Structure formats: C-alpha cells, structure tokens
Image (cartoon, rainbow, N blue to C red):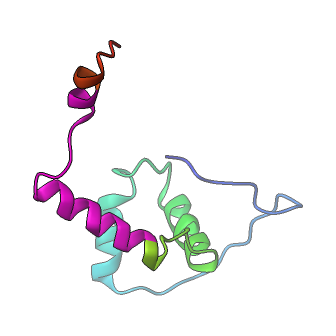
Amino acid sequence: MSTDRDAGTDGEMEKINVRVPKTLLAEVDEVWEERGYASKSEFVRDALRDAVEPPTQLSEEALEHLAESREQRDDGETVSQADVKERLGIDD
C-alpha cells in the first residue's frame, strides 16, 4: 500500500527527529509492513499526512442512515441482491 507522494514541488525531503514512547514504536514495528508500507518512514509520513489532512468522514446524517439500514437488516426487513434478481427474473 505505497502511498508515498512526491516530497513537494522540489522533490526534497527533510529529516526530522521524533521521540515516541517505546510501546508506540513497538506497535508501529508490528504493523507498518503488514499494512503494505515499503518502510517505517513511509508509514509515519502517511500518518502525518492524515493528521494534517484528515480522511473524509461520513456526516451524521449518513451515519444515521447506516444505522437505520443495519436495523432493517437485523429485523429481516431487507432482501439480498440474489433474492431481488430471482424475483425479477434477472440472470447475471
């Protein structure tokens, strides 16, 4: 999952020193490769990008609709795609 982008308009990178608790570093060491990053540095750069430009989050309205959909599914008020296709006589 390489998400490394150009380092900026000039392509240069700057090295920084950051102190982190040993326990946090141990967690980073466990997951950066699992998540498909080429290096621990790439993982940290991606985390910093997310801190500066957080990923898009769903609105409260969208979250409410999702909760309602889950309730409908749990109450058996929904049908599967296969059931709909069968009812309508649609073949793949």
Above or below, 90 relative to 5: above
Q: Nearer the viewer, residue 29 or 47?
A: 47
Above or below, 59 relative to 3: below
Q: Nearer the viewer, residue 57 or 9?
A: 57
Above or below, 79 relative to 58: above
Residue 76 shown in magenta:
yes
Q: What residue do we see at 75% from left, 55% from top?
A: 6
Magenta part, dominant SS: helix
Q: What residue do we see at 75% from left, 65% from top?
A: 13
What residue occupies the far top of the structure in this picture? 91
| Res 71 → quadrant | bottom left
Image check: 84 left or right of 51?
left
Above or below, 39 relative to 80: below
Residue 51: percent from left, percent from top? 56, 79
Residues in magenta, as a range:
62-84
What residue occupies the far left of the structure in this picture? 75
Q: What residue do we see at 29% from left, 16% from top?
A: 89
Residue 2: percent from left, percent from top? 55, 47
Residue 48: percent from left, percent from top? 57, 74
Q: How many marks?
A: 0
Q: Nearer the viewer, residue 7 or 91?
A: 91
Residue 31: percent from left, percent from top? 33, 59
Image check: 80 left or right of 33?
left
Image check: 76 left or right of 25?
left
Residue 44 shown in magenta:
no
What residue occupies the far front of the structure in this picture? 88
Q: What residue do we see at 88% from left, 61% from top?
A: 9
